[in-house]
Image (cartoon, helix red, strand yellow):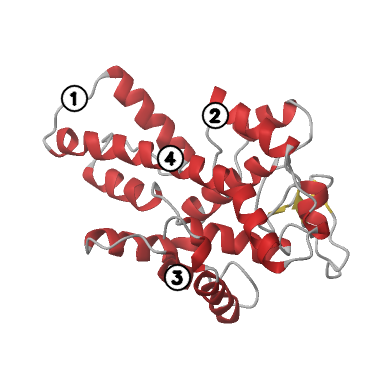
């Protein structure tokens, strides 16, 4: 599901340049670099926090800056697409910079431009993918998949979402991997990069088209993009199917006092 990430500076280059089933990760800005470094250096040992409320607060507060950063990035990308929507509809030419940026987003979100260029159909497909993911959903999945930051994959590999890779040596081999299986659990250079990869996975992987369609419907109806509803599109995130969806929705409801957004 995700690409190989090492713990060196080269990891950032690999993350930017490689293509995976999860989509291409956007290039790093100076702010990205700062968040990457700070999220690694301040990583708590959640296993030592015995009070349940304190552990939840610490876990959510630890990952929230990365979630907010990613949602801000996606919101700016979406704003750009909405900005060029009228000129595209009207058949007007875009500036060179606008065209270059649109092509970059096209590559990152895996919505190819055809010979006709930026059409209304292309924009609709892009807007289906380029959109925010509520922090309640992201943080609930992170808590569920990582055992509140205590799993082996979170501690050793900064992987908070159970994301897989398929090249030998690309990550950590699960202890309970089925016979004949070849997947590994991806390793990230920082917790922030795990969050970034999760966003691109959910926003591009065909397995989560249902989630994106639910989100688009909320947009059309003028509703707030809301995590409990979006979770209905995650039945393929886990082999547990609907039971997994129900569990994530329950986590969102039970931890609502921690959410700053939907």
Q: Which residue is mark 2?
A: 27
For marks 1 and 4, the one nearer the N-term is: 4
Q: Which residue is mark 4?
A: 72
The picture quadrant where one finds residue 109 is: top left
Q: Nearer the viewer, mark 3 or mark 2?
A: 3
- Residue drawn at x 74%, y 66% is 51
Q: Nearer the viewer, mark 2 or mark 1?
A: 2
Q: Nearer the viewer, mark 1 or mark 3?
A: 3
**Label 3 SS:** helix
Q: Whole-Å distance between the Cαs marked 1 and 3?
A: 40 Å
For marks 2 and 1, the one nearer the N-term is: 2
Q: Nearer the viewer, residue 2 or 261?
A: 261
**Residue 239 rendering spot, x and y as whole percentages:** 65, 74
Q: Nearer the viewer, residue 119 or 234?
A: 234
**Residue 260 rendering spot, x and y as whole percentages:** 45, 55
Looking at the image, do the residues carrying marks 2 and 1 touch, with CB atoms under 8 Å apart?
no
Q: Which mark is residue 93?
A: 1
Q: Residues within 10 Å of mark 1 (few under 14, many from 20)?
A: few
Q: Which residue is mark 3?
A: 228
Q: Residues within 10 Å of mark 4 (few under 14, many from 20)?
A: some
- Tell me the quarter of the image containing the C terminus: bottom left
Q: Nearer the viewer, mark 1 or mark 4?
A: 4
Q: Whole-Å distance between the Cαs marked 4 and 3?
A: 21 Å
- Residue drawn at x 61%, y 55% is 60
Q: Whole-Å distance between the Cαs marked 2 and 1?
A: 26 Å
């Amino acid at each position: 599901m995700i690409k190989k990430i090492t713990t060196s500076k080269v990891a950032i280059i690999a993350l930017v340049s490689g293509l995976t089933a999860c989509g291409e990760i956007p290039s790093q800005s100076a702010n990205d670099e700062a968040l990457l470094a700070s999220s690694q250096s301040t990583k708590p040992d959640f296993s030592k926090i015995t009070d349940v409320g304190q552990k939840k607060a610490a876990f959510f507060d630890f990952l929230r800056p990365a979630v907010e950063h990613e949602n801000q990035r996606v919101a700016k990308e979406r704003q750009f697409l909405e900005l060029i929507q009228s000129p595209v509809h009207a058949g007007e030419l875009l500036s060179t910079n606008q065209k270059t940026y649109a092509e970059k987003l096209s590559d990152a979100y895996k919505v190819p431009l055809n010979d006709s260029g930026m059409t209304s159909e292309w924009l609709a497909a892009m807007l289906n993918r380029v959109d925010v993911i509520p922090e309640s959903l992201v943080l609930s999945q992170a808590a569920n998949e990582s055992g509140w930051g205590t799993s082996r994959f979170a501690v050793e590999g900064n992987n908070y979402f159970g994301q897989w890779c398929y090249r030998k040596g690309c990550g950590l081999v699960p202890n309970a991997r089925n016979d004949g299986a070849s997947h590994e659990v991806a390793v990230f250079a920082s917790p922030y990069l795990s969050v970034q990869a999760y966003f691109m996975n959910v926003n591009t992987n065909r397995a989560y088209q249902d989630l994106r369609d639910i989100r688009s419907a909320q947009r059309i109806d003028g509703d707030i993009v809301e995590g409990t509803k979006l979770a209905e599109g995650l039945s393929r995130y886990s082999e547990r199917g609907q039971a997994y969806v129900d569990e994530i929705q329950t986590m969102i409801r039970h931890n609502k006092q921690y959410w700053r957004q939907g």
